[in-house]
Amino acid sequence: MRPLRLSLRAFGPFADTQVIDFRPALERRLFGIYGPMGAGKTSILDGLCFALFGESSGQERQGEDLRSHHASAEVETQAELVFDVGGKRYHLVRRPRQTVRGRRVGALVERAHWAALYDATGMPVDDIGPDNPGVALEERKVEAVADRLQAILHYSAAQFRQVVLLPQGQFRQLLTASSDQRSAVLRGLFDVSLYERFVERLKAEASALRDAVGQGRTQIEAHLAAQDASDLEGLNQALADAAEQAMAQARLRDAEAQDRDRLRTALQTAQALAGRFAEHDAAQAAVAALLDEQGKIEDLKVRHAAAAKAETCAAADARAAAAAHTLTTAVTARRTALEEAERLDALAAAAADRLDQSAALQPERDAAVALVTGLDAYRTRLENARPLKDHALASASARAGAASALASAQSARAAAAEALEQSLAQHARAQQQTLRAEALETALALARKEHKTAVEFEDAVKAVERLSALTASAQARLAAARLDLAKARSAEEAAETALSEAQASHLALVLVEGQPCPVCGSEAHPHPAKPAVDGQDLEQVRRAARTLRQDADTAERQAAEAAAMIEGEGKGADTRLRALKAPPRAAEQVAADCVRLEQDLAQLMAEDLAGLAQALETAQGAVGTADKALAETQTAFALADKDDAAAKAAFEAALSDVPKDLRDETRLTAARTQAIAARDQMLERHAGALAAERSASEAAKVAAATAEAAGQREGELEVTAKAEAIALEAALSAAGFDAAGYETAKADAPHLETFAAQIRALGERAAAAADRRDRAAAAIADQARPDLALAEAALVAADTRLAGLEQAVSTLGMRVGQLEATRDIVVKLEDELAFATERYRVLGELSNLSDGRNAHRLRLRDFAIAATFDLVLEAANLRFSRMSRGRFALQRKLEGGDGRVRSGLDIEVYDAHTDQKRDAHTLSGGEGFLASLSLALGLSDVVQAESGGVRLDAIFIDEGFGHLDDETLDIALETLRDLVGQDRAVGVISHVDGVKQQILAGFDVVRTLRGSQIAPRRDD
């Protein structure tokens, strides 16, 4: 992880926003962060750690405790970090839980912990900001941001403080930690899950093979028992017996099938003869039915002859009907023409009356025309007076504007006078308060300093008390977890032993004297195991015990990590408390004084004397300006009022002869439009009356002529109709028809062809029925009617006997198939059982060795951690030996004993001056600092080399150089220079002058009364 830019707002001692641009310092590789004690050097590391993980570098303060006491209540605390990991760039923003003043109502509100992570890859650092944050990866959900950062960085906050950020008070934690605490840290930094998965896979495969051996034997016995056989030989004998029975039943089935086929042929022959007898019966019935239809044929012949005669009279009938129809139409037309002539005569008389009435209204039409002419004259007068009207309206508008301006000027003059009086009073009062504000500022600075000291002391006391209780609780949980782990391991070993004994007793059942044992290979079996309880139950017990042991192992590891972390925090908190002096007053009392002084000062400082003087001068100038504006607006109003009166008089004179209600153009236009409409309506009505009278008179004349012509046509058609009726009567008499007979025959005339076809069809059907009857009689000559029921019963009985034999053959065949399949399965299972037994012997031994069931009781995971820690110590000694001038080296203790104690991770120090090994706690302050620094740097080297996903582009060291003499300090700094030469940057936080003189690049933290400021250092 390579930090590029850190922005802190209202954070720790920083009241406003402080931006730390690490890029120039990172280019120099080795840089410092300097400032007096309490200025806020460590707060930079707090900001870096809080931005990444939501907690401070020393884990003493939570996010809500990091808010600046110098910041105003409206400003939210925030940490913003831009950093690179590999080839990716990220932008991280985080705000702690805090209480600030709301924007809307002004009341204090509590903000929840908030974080957001953005992908800013490819974006210049200077372009990244609130308006251009990058592509959102996670927003607002703190847990989701934490999970994404864990995947990116590959370490937690605790591991960050061990290998990247070495905070004040916790620098020696890794050096002085216990073996279990150190193991927890290393397991978090170095991924040993591969070894754990390997062990679990071995155990799972061994368990699966053990299960397979037991299940294989159980399956063999189950298959044999299912076939009522005790062994494979008995199974083969049962198979031979079943095959012989199946062959005997098959022979009986074949004989019965031949008899059944003979009976089926006889039934088919009888069914064919019965069909011929049925055909003869049907043919006789058809002949009898046709004899009943002979009368129908004669009726059709009579109707056919009558219809043929009716066709000879059809032409005369058609002519008579047409003449009668034409006469009827002519009569109707004459009547219609007479009625229309009468109607049109009445309409012509009415039109003449209306024309007389319209002629009487001529004076009213003349008056309407005169009214339109007069209104046109008024319109011309209004158009000529329009310029005078426009001028009058403009004058009225100008007068109203002048009146409004006059009122505004009068109000402005009054307001300016009032503001001048207020400004004079405020200026006098502010001069009296300036002296008192200076005294309050001095008192507030002293009170804030006292409050900060009291808060630091009380926070340190609370931290010690809290961590003391947490340490006791964590140790108790660790002890309980270790006790549970020991019990779980004992239970698992007992379950393993019981299951092994059960499997041994199961294998003993198949041992044969003189043949090798499938487990040990011996041909002698002097003491075979006795049968035990069911192995399946013991396997369930073993699995449950293994699950409990795994859970207990996880719980013990987590408890050890928690205890190590809390113990280290407790030591750091105790050290910080001893370095502080008890204040004379409680922080709460001092805070009350600060609040009171701030309130008093805020009230006094609200008045700005210079600003009030400027406001007074402005108010005086405003009064003069208002007086001048008032005089100008009064003159303008008088002129506008005079012009408005003259314009109104001119307009009234121009329209003196126009009625007042018609001086408005809209009203005049409406009146003229109405008059024109009335005039036009009267003229149109008179013209319509003239046209209607002429049209009605002409239509009456035409209708009279039409009625006369229709009467003449009716007489002519009546003569023709009588002649055609006489001709029709003569034709009917010649054909022998009366009126009723002709109508009946005429109705059948369209069906002549149908009658002829029906007559032919009945004759053909009679001939066909007689032929069918003769052929059917010939087919049954000399034959007797068969008994089908008897033949069918014989065939059903034969089918039943054959089905029974088929079922017997099928059942025996299935039995043979089952026995053959069981034999093949048993042979295959015995081969697989032998292979699984041999494989279990090898994998079971490997599983026991890797899971700690060996002479050293050392697990593969712990062996890998110990080997990795040896690499850490080797890397640390490269620097520790140099910085101690070859005197010291770090070593790992290797515990001995009876093989029941694991090798640990405790550290001891080899002293070349005494040729003795000593505990790490015996090192002096300076020696301990060098050892801790070497161990931390060595750990960083190995973490980056061994953990592929972890990148340590920069590390930070907080204090510790004050314990070193000048020569040792030079060696330590030279070691750091060598370290940064390996493409890694190191930041040193210190107030030691020797460090400042040798490391010029970096930042200065300057403390002021209103909060600290951060400035980059010049290294030239």
Image (cartoon, rainbow, N blue to C red):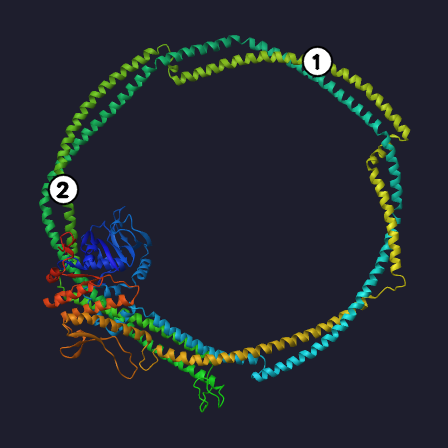
The residue drawn where x is 48% and y is 81% is 834
Q: Which numbered dot is residue 704?
A: 1
- The kind of secondary structure element at disc 2 is loop
Report x, y in % for residue 215: 49, 78
In the picture, the quarter occupied by the C terminus is: bottom left
* Count of numbered circles in the view: 2
Q: Residue at x 88, y 52 (%)?
A: 770
Q: Is residue 752 above or below residue 907?
A: above
When the figure is inspected, residue 110 is found, relative to residue 863, above or below; the finding is above
What is the x, y in percent for residue 1017? 15, 55
Q: Image quadrant of residue 685?
A: top right
**Is 291 rendered above or below residue 648?**
below
- Residue 444 position, x and y percent, is 13, 52
Is residue 263 shown left or right of residue 138? right
At mark 1, the secondary structure is: helix
Three-letter amino acid code at the position of disc 1: Ala
Q: Amino acid at mark 2?
A: Asp
The image's mark for residue 608 is 2
